[in-house]
Image: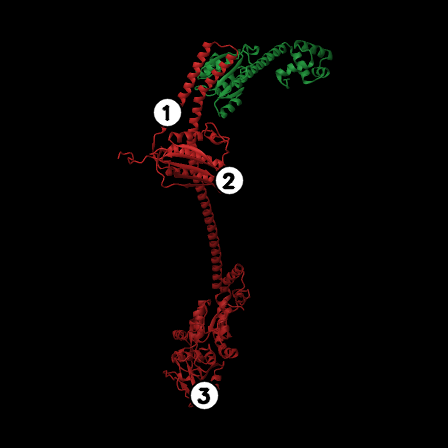
Amino acid sequence: MTHNQAPGTPAAADKTIFVVDDDQAVRESLRWLISSVGLKVETYASAQDFLDDYSPDRPGCVLVDVRMPAMNGLELQKHLAEKPHCLPVIMVTGHGDVQMAVRAMKDGAFDFIEKPYNDQILLDLVQKAVRECDRRRTEVIGHREIQDLIDTLTPRERQVMDMIVEGNTNKQIAHALTISDKTVEAHRAKVMEKLEAPSLADLIRKSLTLHGPNPPR
Amino acid sequence: MQNITRSAFRPVRIVVAVCTVVMGLSWGGTAWAATPEVPAPPETLLGSAQDVKIAVLAFRGKPSAMKKWQPMADYLSQRIDGYRFSIVPLSLDEMHQAVNSESVDFILTNPGNYVEHEATFGVTRLATLKPRTHSITDSLGATIFTRNEDNGINTIADLKGKQFMAIRENAFGGFQVAWREMRAQGLDPFKDLASLVFVGFPQDKVVEAVLSGDVDAGTSRAGVLENLAQNGKIDLSKVRILNPRNEPDFPFALSTRLYPEWPFAQLKHTPEQLSQKVVIALLSMAPDDPAAVAGGYAGWTVPLDYQSVHELFKDLNIGPYGQPVKIKWSDLVEQYWHWGLFAGVLMAIAMLWVVRVEHLVAKRTGELSRANAELETQISERKRAEEIASRRQNELAHVSRVNTMGELTASLAHEINQPLSAIANYATGSVRRLSLNAISPTDLRDVMETIAAEAERAGEVIRRVRNLVRKSEVSLGRLDLNAIVRETIDISRAEAERQHIELHGRLDRTAPTVIADKVQIEQVLLNLIGNAMEALHDSPQVPRTITITTHTTDRAPHDAPDALGDVVCAVHDNGVGIPDDTGENLFEAFYSTKPDGMGMGLSISRSIIEASGGRMWIETNTGPVRTSIFKFSLPRTPPPSSSRTPT
């Protein structure tokens, strides 16, 4: 057993681990174990309790028992998938409950862990899920920021940007839009400025982040 | 050949032509070819007389017949307006042909010939010849005679072994009449005579041959002898008449009965009107008419009864009553071609019908055998389906038991996992805190207490499950282990057959009863058999066998003085054995060597056996092939007798 996870690790500081289990002993013992590495833990006795209390703003991950009365882990996962969230879900399954595990993964679970589990493996998994949560949040925030920048473009500038990203030269753009090369250059400079792109490569990256390799025309 | 038969014949020719085309056969063709080919019917020759042909039997040669009968034809032509009568002299064969082909209108022939035609072709007599020499009606007879010397021939019977002569076999007055008398006397002229010579016309030849001694005796028509004598050719005293008969008013020597004279007859097709005219003319012919004089007769009388002639033929089995006349095949064809045609068509139809029936029968037989084959296929399919169904049922029974166990073990695992997980979480969480000095003794004590409580809870779960199992043990009782083994083998039989595994039982009939739950022991056995089947699954062994044995063991007396022996059941298979290092692990829960195994079968089985007071273990057979034997023992039922009764 290693103890390299010190409590209060910066990455984990503002994160909450949401433990959902109908068995009180299990969820309290999980709180005891997970909080020993400095993570904040909140426990819920049912999936519905968690959903009622949940706010998309709070980062972290969900640790849920697949077998529960009323709403089981898989159903909870489905409910979460319908909401704008970024919480990774770790499914806790019984021994040999391979079918449940496979279904959970297909439904988009971050990972699953079989009971009985090794505490280190569980904690590593939880840390991984928290980092995944960070990554997802950054991605979402990044997207939102880029979108805000793009929204400042005039329609003509937007047109020019799309054509640049498609790989057109200034001449081609001028021809296609029946404007002068100088005008294209002016638009181009404005686009770079507004998107805070120091280079063409950065401009393309920002555009692709939002729209993928095929931006809409 | 222009005559009145033409118009009457035409429809027949059309039919013939049609039938020729239909049949495509050539038989009888000669008969049709013989029919007249002149197309112009006589009716078109207005103003000129119609030809009427009278066929006359020319027994003395055609010129003679013409000379004798032509005056009669002239007489008729004279008397009947619009017709020209002519004589057609014919031999017996030609007469037959002419009547058959209806190429003549009337015939004049001897009584025998007439009767034949009457019977065969339906000719009708119109008048009978009236003889000039006498006035009795039946006037035709024969004389049988020999030389009037001492030759031992005095009766017809004496003719046996003698030489005999007549003119022709089919001559009526010249032979057949005499033949009847011979037969009446018990003499068959064709068998009993030394020789029978037919010399041919004229009849004089017979008389000459008898008198000259060429033959012993002969026959001729009555009157011939007298005629010859009258002409001075013979001396009647040199002739002896055999079987002489005396008929009043009959002027000639006679050996036979008398028959009517020659008839004049019409054919079927001859118009009735013409026949009437002919009859009137003939009957009114005067004895001194030139025609009568030329013919040597006295005229014509009403047609006589020819029954006596029929009787003669009947007696002799000839004529219409037998086959004395050599009938040529072509004549038969000629005579009966239409019947032949009809029969041919009928046969053809019958054959077609038979062929059709055969075809239908073959078809139906084919259909039936196909239907039968189909039915058999269906039956075998049904059987197979039933087999599959019963196998499925057995599989289901097996699976449901295993599933029940599986469900139980899965929920059992979950129930126990909960407290175990909690314990582990508390323990590991505490260790982490301790290593960081981040825990107070009070907190630690609280957690330890919780751990202890959870451990208790786990124990509680196990107790609860045991209680549950115990509750289901409704029927702990005396069991015949052999019966259970047999029943289990029966249940597994279908599945074993499907996997080509032989399932045997080798049971100790003397094994005592045991105390256990029947269903539980069955489950144990099914589990062991199922494991054995899986072990055999990839086995190259042939045959693959599973053998279940039972036997009774004796416990050592010192073990316990009153101990009872166990009944041991063993499941052998000839598949690959279990490796040594696996051994006892097999009985641990969640331990499985199978890819989809629950790892609970043997564990539960052992629990069941142990709960019943028995043991379960593996033995390895290290022969040339390493095999594993799963065994379990169950304690025998204490004997009902009180062995511990104080003495």
What residue is disc 3 on? Answer: B229
Separation (CA) of disc 2 from disc 3:
135 Å
Could one spot residue B254 in this view of the protein?
no
Q: Earlier in the sequence, mark 3 or mark 1?
A: 3
Instruction: Identify the image quadrant of residue B639.
Output: top left
Q: Name the residue nearer the viewer: B128 or B393.
A: B393
Image coordinates of residue A211 in percent, x first then y, are 62, 17
Give SS at disc 2.
loop
What residue is disc 2 on? Answer: B625
Image coordinates of residue B369 in percent, x first then y, are 46, 49
Q: Earlier in the sequence, mark 2 or mark 3?
A: 3
Q: Residue at x 44, y 25 (%)?
A: B410
Could one spot residue B604 in this view of the protein?
yes
Does mark 1 fall on the same chain as mark 2? yes
Instruction: Identify the image quadrant of residue B454.
Output: top left
Q: B514 left or right of A93?
A: left
Q: Which chain is green?
A: A
Q: Name the residue nearer the viewer: B24 or A38.
A: A38
Instruction: Identify the image quadrant of residue B30.
Output: bottom right
The tint chain B carries is red
3 and 1 marks in contact (CB < 8 Å) = no
Q: Name the residue nearer the viewer: B84 or B620.
A: B620
- Which marked residue is nearer to the observer: mark 2 or mark 3? 2
Q: Amino acid at mark 2?
A: Val
- Which marked residue is nearer to the observer: mark 3 or mark 1? 1
Q: Amino acid at mark 1?
A: Asn
Rate crowding at label 2 as few (under 14), some (14 to 19) or many (20 or more) other CA atoms within 10 Å: few
Disc number at residue A161?
none
Q: Amino acid at mark 3?
A: Ala
Disc number at residue B467?
1
Q: Is B321 situated above or below A133? A: below
